[in-house]
Amino acid sequence: MLARKVTLLFILCLTSLAKAEPAETLSLASALKIAVQENPNLAQMQARYIAMSAIPAQMGSLPDPVISFNALNIPTDSFDLAQENMTQMQGGISQSIPFFGKLTLSAETANYQAEAAKYDVDEVRLNLLSYVKQNWWMLFYLQRSLNIINSNQNLLRQFVAIARTKYEVGEGLQQDVLLAQLELSKLLDKQIKVKATLKKYQAQLNTLLSRPANQLIQLPETVPETLAALKSENLLYTDAENTRALLSSRRENIHAAQSRLKLAEKDLLPDFNVGVFYGGRVDNLAGQERADLISFKVSMTVPIFAGSKQQKAIDQYNSELIQQRYLLKEQWNQTRADISSAYSDYQQHQQQATLFKQGIIPQAKQTVASMLAGYQVNKVDFLNLVRSQITLYNYEIQYWQALSLANQAAAQLIAIIGKEEIYE
């Protein structure tokens, strides 16, 4: 009779009530779509790129011409325009003309900077998607952990009832009841910690999605659990060299620095200003008609301070070019290091998830079932039964953590390499 009662209680603790699916759940695809549409940091980077795209046309255009109106050689004794032959009312137009090639180099520099800004947008977008994926998977792991904790709390409550029943009929010990209650309290402590961590990651994900930080997030109950094999590490290096947006941005900055250097060298050459002016004269005091006058002007800058000005600018831009080259090299070295780190993390967590799912958890479940059967006939003590269930609980938590961390490492790899194709 007692054995039947124990068996019934155990069956009840393994049966969970079906939970109604929330009206709306935040799938990973939905989170990524919202982030791209709503994230303010990505939006400001896109606005920056649009603004910088408008600069090359400005830099490649001639300066605005100057229209002038002048009153020349007016006698101050009478202010009579007819008194002096030199008196005239003049209108003209002049145009500054930089030395050949300067405007082209200015536009070229701005164009390279705009291209770098475009790659910066791509880099920010890829990092944003990576952060969303990492936070989403961390939230999924924490929510799944809470579900497992709740399930195990129900199990331990049933164990407490089993132990109390056996104690009341004289077949169990009071210490078994106390032990089950202690383990239940430990789970409550774990639940408090997991909820606090979940709230933190929920706030981070909401921020990425431009939502109120305290907005509740409900994730799907199930996710794909397949972890595909990655490409070889060397292939990922090659992909990153060709597709990483940040590396492309660094290369565009090098091109911009080269153009700035060429422009600084061109500044050793003069700029010109040309103009034409028409002077109108009135008839003289005797009524004689006086011819109007036309004047032409050509002027040029003379770089007589080249040693302290233009040459210093050349030195400055040459150093900036060297700096940009080192920045590219440093970023490439960091990219390879980041790939290796994320690659190693993925491999580790992929193997752990496979081991837990295919080996450890099924074995632990068999152990729990065997312990329960032994406990029913008093061949296994209550402590070992509880320990076996807690061990199974820990393994299930570790499985979902490994799955989550593997997907987070994959998200990092995609951002580092600059494209989704990281698998074989």
Image: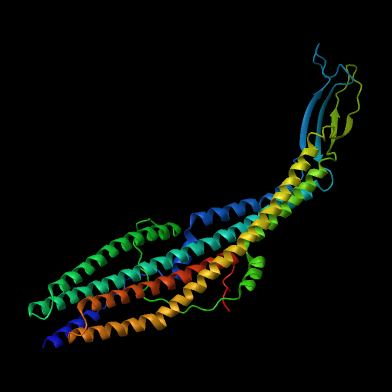
Identify the image quadrant of residue 165.
bottom left
- Residue, x 28% and y 82% (percent of image)? 368
Q: How is the image coloured?
A: rainbow
- Residue 115 visible at all: no
Give the image location of residue 357, x and y in percent. 40, 80
Position of residue 147 in the picture relative to residue 32 (left or right): left
Query: On the rendered image, what quadrant is the C terminus found in?
Result: bottom right
Query: On the rendered image, what quadrant is the N terminus found in?
Result: bottom left
Q: Residue furthest left?
A: 169
Identify the image quadrant of residue 356.
bottom left
Give the image location of residue 128, x and y in percent. 51, 61
- Residue, x 77% and y 29% (percent of image)? 69
Q: Is residue 129 above or below residue 294?
A: below
Task: Pick the residue in front: 373 or 300.
Answer: 373
- Residue, x 48% and y 68% (percent of image)? 408
Q: Is residue 386 above or below residue 297?
A: below
- Residue, x 23% and y 69% (percent of image)? 183
Give the image location of residue 306, x and y in percent. 82, 35
Task: Pick the residue in front: 372 or 416.
Answer: 372
Give the image location of residue 202, x and y in percent. 38, 61
Task: Pick the residue in front: 352 or 206.
Answer: 352
Q: Is residue 185 above or below residue 108?
A: below
Q: Residue furthest top?
A: 77
- Residue 314 visible at all: yes
